[in-house]
Amino acid sequence: MIEKLNTPIYVTQPALPPLEEFTELLKQIWDNKILTNNGPFHRQFENELAEYLGVKYISVFTNGTLALMTALQALRITGEVITTPFSFVATTHSLWWNNIKPVFADIDPDYFNLDPEKVEAAITPQTTAIMPVHVYGNPCKLEVFQRIADTYGLKLIYDAAHAFGVKVNGESVLNFGDLSILSFHATKVFNTIEGGAIICHDEKTKQRIDYLKNFGFADETTVIAPGINAKMNELQAAYGLLQLKYVDGNIGKRKAIADIYRVHLQDVPGIRCLPDIEGVNHAYSYFPVLVDSSGYGRTRDEIYEELKRHNIFGRRYFYPLISQFPTYRGLSSSRPDNLPIATKIAEQVICLPIYPELSFDIVKSISEIISSYQNPSK
């Protein structure tokens, strides 16, 4: 029997750079007394981040939600946008705050991304854009979505909050669509404590994005649009520069943890782990498993509570569906019969702890708890 752990184990824990290295950069900030407004660390961070990610243009933000909201403004999106109910609420909130009507389409049963066929069926004359999410960092069907967007004259905006560093056949997923949005929240593979970014493909679009995130100022006396204040400050940018030095090592540690889970859970009836996708460089943002109660003998929620009794805190990402929240459940596209796959996955999924400093012994213990808790006779 596995004893309750003395220290809580959460679904994630932020990776932090060495404090002494950050202190050295703070000294520079204290000396030059530039804290924000496109300072030297901000500019350096954008340049080095673009190079690391393999993208042409990037604009960093104080958080990913404001990046999403600004992306919609930058492309002048109106009307209806087709998106997923299986995501963090910020995806859909960004539409609501821009007075855009979200239209939910169902997801695929393999990697839980938007199903392109369901998206195409949901297009109406009011549809202006598609906003898919690379759920858990697993890439959407990029070419298919681009074909749909081109056929119907729609903008394509990817919420890539989970997809930092993810590549398909050597190409960054961030180079697809009209815009991609990253999150650098503390829970992410790459964090700047809070933070985010918009990736675009031409200088003119980046300039408009940069104007919009700084109140719409084009120069000292010219305001070209009703922008907001979403600039990343110098402390975040300096912190982000340090994180770039360590992110590859951290992703490697996350991969090792994912491999251990898969080995120890592969033969547990009713437990399904997602395999890596051929040709994809994954970032291992999350480690989701599905619990089929008919095979496992217990429900996902029972596993969730059993882990909590051992001081282990997984998360039911994403439950409930965004479409089930009061703000959105009145929409016609929110009906459960319109979203059968998403509804099923939301009832089965649990994300297990994964972060660079998580010990292999703890990973094995978590796997053992899940393995031993099954109830074949139920």
Image: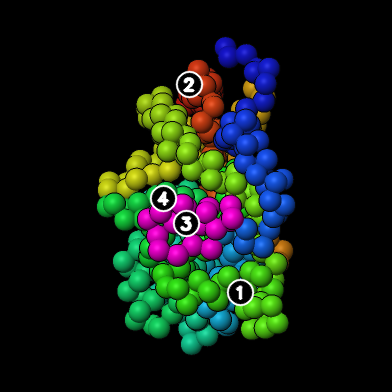
Mark 2 falls on what kind of element? Answer: helix
Viewer can see residue 61: yes
Viewer can see residue 336: no
Colour basis: rainbow
- Nearer to us of marks 4 and 3 is 3
- Residue, disc 4: 52
Q: Earlier in the sequence, mark 2 or mark 1?
A: 1
Quadrant the N terminus occupies? top right
Residue occupying the far bottom of the picture: 125
Magenta-drawn segment: 40-59
Q: What whole-number distance in Å separates the C-alpha atoms at marks 4 and 3?
A: 9 Å
- Residue, disc 2: 360
Q: In the image, what residue type sits under mark 4? A: Tyr
Q: Does residue 43 belong to the magenta stretch?
A: yes
Q: What whole-number distance in Å separates the C-alpha atoms at marks 1 and 3?
A: 18 Å
- Residue, disc 1: 211
Q: What whole-number distance in Å separates the C-alpha atoms at marks 2 and 1?
A: 46 Å
Which quarter of the figure has residue 224?
A: bottom right
x 54%, y 27%: residue: 357
- Most foreground residue, 160 or 275: 160
- Residue, disc 3: 47
- Nearer to us of marks 1 and 3 is 3
Q: Earlier in the sequence, mark 3 or mark 2?
A: 3
Q: In the image, what residue type sits under mark 3? A: Asn
Mark 4 falls on what kind of element? Answer: helix
